[in-house]
Image (cartoon, helix red, strand yellow):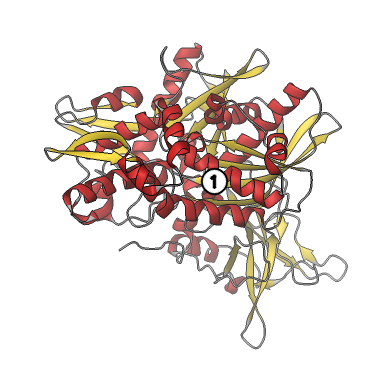
Amino acid sequence: MVNLGVDFGSTYTMVSVFRDGKPQTVQPDNLTFHYPSIVVYDKKKQKYFYGTSARNKLGAPGIVPFRGFKMLLNSRMSAEQLRARNYDEVNTPESITERFLKYVVDNTLKKLEEDKVGTLVLGAPECWFQSIETVDSRGVLRDICCRMKDKIEDVRIVSEPTNAAAYSVWCYEKERKKQFEGNVLVVDYGGGTLDTAVVSVRHKDNERLMIRPEMRSGRGENLDNEIGSAGIAYQEAVVKKAIRDALDIHNAEIHYGADFDKAVKYLENILVTDAENVEETFEDNLTSLSALKTEELLTFDYDDQEITITYGQLKEVYDETIAPILAKVLEETTEDIARNDQVYVSLVGGFCNYYLVRKQVTDYFNHFFGWGSIGAKEKIMRLREDEREKAIAHGASLFADDILDVCYVAQFGIGMYSYLPNGSTYKQYAISYGQEYVPDQIYFSRDDDGEIAVMMLTKLDTFLINFDRNRDAHMPPMKPKKEFANRLNAVKCGYMVVVGFSIDARERIKVHIYEYNNDPQHRGPGEQPVASIPLKTFRESFENTVIHAG
């Protein structure tokens, strides 16, 4: 049995194992250290292909490609938009994700000559921790892994920047041979998401590393028929701009066919393999957009037309689609950070290797912290370029092998709305946003005075879920859907009840209903809950959680 850390990326997926005193990448073959996150269906052979085999078949006749499926797990795209990307009732983003992850796990076990995974720690984008619209993606991913119980014994979902921070601090301590205490701000920019997070680092019993998530921000929701707000969206936007400029057409007239897929793949390869030349060209011409417009990066074929991508188009698309989002996320993450010497910065993720991203991030922190060029060198936890892409998987392997701990911190507040005699409602939290919790421990909804709240059984229809650090933020009541409501209504209990909530190690929520003991000497919940009702995904449990795309 082996423990694994997995960085399930929108562009690439990487697997790490802790062996010989350090995290090591499990190579899918002798040439690469990651799996392209691609699945294709070969109509002629009636067979699915994965990873490198799938990527090599892109553009061939009879090949149906599936990309970006991770970012579509809790899709806000319409059925028509999904069909435009080849998904249908059979090949859903969830089913394609399950096929792909099963392939990755099976192939990894074969490489390691093992038969089962003990603990699998899987990285999830930060934006999946931040709103009622995106958090279910984590639950879907967790449940996919749980269905592979013949191969995986236990699974835990940890945010990607938390994994990256863990590895950055572990490397820092190994290199400098001293303990790190303080805060690490992680900028994780990948193919589908931009995530930032601040984690505090301490040592349990003055030895064991403890990582506690503090502040988080992220982007990656699928808006305007784009996949995420990072590398994939940028590369697709550059290709579309080149086509628009050359053929004088609108975005709606561009089709996602074999030519388009080939162009995106070609652009991605050039930005990775020719990164040094890309950086030099930008450095020489960055102050002049007109000069960049004359510098050609590559040409590709689209509908029998030769299309050119210039450095000017790279810069224009970056300024339009990436720079504003990156600036906003950096501002959101740093607004609560004190300007002190205890904040370090770690850049991870494949897109952080891109020159324009690195320049914007470095310039921002130099200005924010007032570091200057010398200070920046000391305050950035610099991983080697190849290690930036491995940081999430390596950090996940440290957690999977129990080398260090991550604190259980609630990513949302949860409780009940209660009714006052005048018909108005007030909020009663059981668990608050940012609260450390013990897995499976039951926490009770409480009033403003901290007393355990008592409510009528017939009023268990207005739940409170809050992803805002502000406890007083206005949050609409969450109404149970029919199946969940029926389970609540089926509880055999007295008229007055006490409601508790628990979150297990896999972040699955249970609602616990107790009879209220009105004995003056023992007022409060009974000794055991009358019913413990697990929540499925928020989307399946509550009415007002889904934003319908047009």
Residue 429, image x and y in percent? 69, 64
Compared with 362, 171 (above or below) is above
Judge by depth and name the residue closer to the eye, 379 or 286. 286
Judge by depth and name the residue closer to the eye, 25 or 73. 25
Residue 506, image x and y in percent? 59, 41
Which residue occupies 18% across, 54% down?
249
Q: Residue furthest left?
A: 304
Left/right of residue 476 with respect to residue 233 in the rendered view: right
Residue indicated by mark 1: 360
Residue 294 visible: yes
Q: Quadrant of the N terminus?
A: top right
In the structure shown, which secondary structural element does the residue marked by tag 1 occupy? helix
Residue 159 visible: no
Residue 436, image x and y in percent? 73, 49
Which residue occupies 86% across, 31% down?
206
Residue 427, image x and y in percent? 66, 72
Q: Based on the displayed image, in which of its 4 quarters is residue 455 positioned? A: bottom right
Q: Residue furthest right?
A: 521
Compared with 20, 201 (above or below) is below
Left/right of residue 219 with respect to residue 302 in the rendered view: right
Which residue occupies 65% across, 24% down?
401
Q: Amino acid at mark 1?
A: Gln
Judge by depth and name the residue closer to the eye, 40 or 386. 386
Q: Based on the displayed image, in which of its 4 quarters is residue 36 positioned? A: top left
